[in-house]
């Protein structure tokens, strides 16, 4: 072969190799790299330095961060976790640091966030109906950042449809469950070309409740269980509507009714949903007593009682309503209609240090809500029954 032809073919082969590397190198590397297989949600409480894939309990008001996690399988079969979390804990065990890294692949990864909640905030169970009416649903949080990590929020997706007047705030307590969906590969407009990985959602509840990525933020003392149920669906049997406290429940004697009450106790304890009577039983049990042993006195709502005599966690009742004291609060601003609409998210200011009808309570008439005493007990001034669960006798 002539030298000129030999040089030509050598140059051609080099060009082909270079083009092949440029065109197919990244794809080959991707195929040989860790293969994504599952998505998870990890929760990092403020200051923890480690994100947990599973349930986390925090004090009310504690900030937390949600981290998307994409699990991949390496060539040797070991897992690798793509996430922005500083460290990971899965199944109670810390993941080795060399198996945790941010997403560094050439393909784009788009992250979308959901909350997993009961389909409605309140269900009234007629005679013969059971907890099978409780359904879980994944709610797209389109107002949340499309980010691998974001500041956690507790507010439910459907809290603006609770019946009755309610002070509309983003409360620093409650229970919330989270789902993340991660789409990898393909152009932004080419939806079908992407691989999609979805973390646990409605289908995994209630079977995986004990391991589901959940944040429960609660107040201290007897108010802990009362504050933790915010954001959960409330299930109320019509047979129990006339009862104020667990000991007042209508004695039905029907096996089906007794089984329903047992299931409502279980759901309330697991923070999957709640019913009013099991919740009040849990609140009272937290004080080391029983519903029949609660000492009831009387207290005026006309501003003559100082807040140092009462406390968050005390119970008030009148007529057929039992509520729990939450906090001293100032009157609503002039012209602010607190009708329950989300148009007026004014935060109540500091109160006057006196127990009056402007103060806030936890109410469970039709879903967990914070309401003013004036919205619960009609009339001016007045006296109601008072159980000092938190403040003491």
Image (cartoon, rainbow, N blue to C red):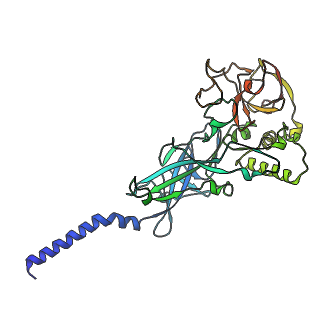
Number of dots carrying numbers: 0
| Snapshot quadrant of residue 229 | top right
Determine whether 303 is above or below 253 in the image.
above
123 on left or right of 157? right
Determine whether 159 is above or below 130 in the image.
above
Q: Position of residue 313 (x, y in %)?
A: 75, 33
Q: Is residue 84 visible?
A: no
Determine whether 131 is above or below 337 in the image.
below
Q: Position of residue 121 (x, y in %)?
A: 68, 42
Most foreground residue, 284 or 237: 237
Q: Residue at x 68, y 55 (%)?
A: 206
Q: Position of residue 323 (x, y in %)?
A: 77, 32
Q: Is residue 365 visible?
A: yes
Q: Residue at x 56, y 52 (%)?
A: 41
Q: Classify the position of the N terminus by image quarter.
A: bottom left
| Snapshot quadrant of residue 190 | bottom left
Q: Classify the position of the C terminus by image quarter.
A: top right
Determine whether 230 is above or below 209 in the image.
above
Most foreground residue, 381 or 139: 139
Q: Residue at x 88, y 41 (%)?
A: 247
Q: Residue at x 75, y 23 (%)?
A: 308
Q: Position of residue 294 (x, y in %)?
A: 86, 35
248 on left or right of 310? right
148 on left or right of 318? left
| Snapshot quadrant of residue 255 | bottom right
- Outermost residue, bottom side: 1
């Amino acid at each position: 072969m002539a030298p000129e032809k030999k040089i030509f073919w050598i140059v051609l082969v080099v060009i082909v190799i270079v083009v092949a590397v440029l065109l197919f190198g990244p794809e080959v590397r991707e195929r040989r790299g860790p293969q994504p297989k599952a998505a998870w949600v990890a929760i990092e409480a403020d200051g923890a330095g480690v994100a947990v894939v599973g349930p986390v309990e925090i004090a009310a008001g504690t900030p937390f961060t949600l981290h998307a996690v994409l699990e991949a399988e390496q060539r040797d079969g070991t897992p690798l976790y793509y996430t922005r979390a500083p460290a990971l804990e899965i199944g109670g065990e810390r993941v080795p640091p060399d198996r945790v890294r941010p997403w560094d692949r050439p393909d784009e990864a788009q992250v979308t966030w959901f909350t997993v909640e009961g389909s409605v905030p309140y269900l009234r169970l007629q005679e013969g109906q059971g907890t099978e009416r409780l359904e879980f649903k994944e709610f797209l949080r389109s107002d949340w950042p499309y980010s691998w990590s974001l500041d956690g929020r507790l507010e439910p997706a459907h809290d603006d449809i609770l019946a009755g007047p309610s002070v509309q705030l983003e409360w620093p307590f409650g229970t919330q469950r989270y789902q993340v969906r991660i789409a990898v590969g393909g152009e932004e407009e080419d939806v079908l070309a992407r691989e999609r990985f979805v973390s646990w959602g409605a289908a995994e509840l209630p079977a995986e409740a004990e391991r589901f990525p959940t944040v429960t933020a609660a107040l201290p003392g007897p108010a802990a269980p009362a504050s933790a149920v915010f954001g959960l669906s409330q299930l109320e049997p019509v047979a129990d509507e006339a009862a104020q406290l667990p000991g007042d429940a209508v004695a039905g004697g029907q096996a089906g009714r007794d089984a329903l009450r047992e299931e409502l106790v279980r759901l309330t304890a697991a923070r999957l949903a709640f019913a009013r009577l099991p919740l009040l039983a849990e609140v009272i049990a937290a004080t080391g007593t029983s519903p029949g042993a609660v000492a009831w006195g009387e207290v005026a709502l006309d501003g003559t009682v100082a807040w140092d005599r009462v406390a968050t966690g005390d119970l008030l009742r009148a007529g057929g309503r039992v509520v729990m004291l939450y906090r001293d609060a100032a009157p609503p601003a002039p012209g602010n209609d607190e009708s329950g609409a989300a148009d007026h998210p004014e935060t109540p200011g500091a109160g006057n240090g006196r127990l009056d009808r402007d103060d806030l309570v936890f109410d469970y008439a039709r879903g967990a809500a914070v309401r003013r005493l004036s919205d619960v007990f009609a009339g001016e001034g007045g006296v109601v029954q008072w159980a000092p669960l938190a403040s003491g006798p």
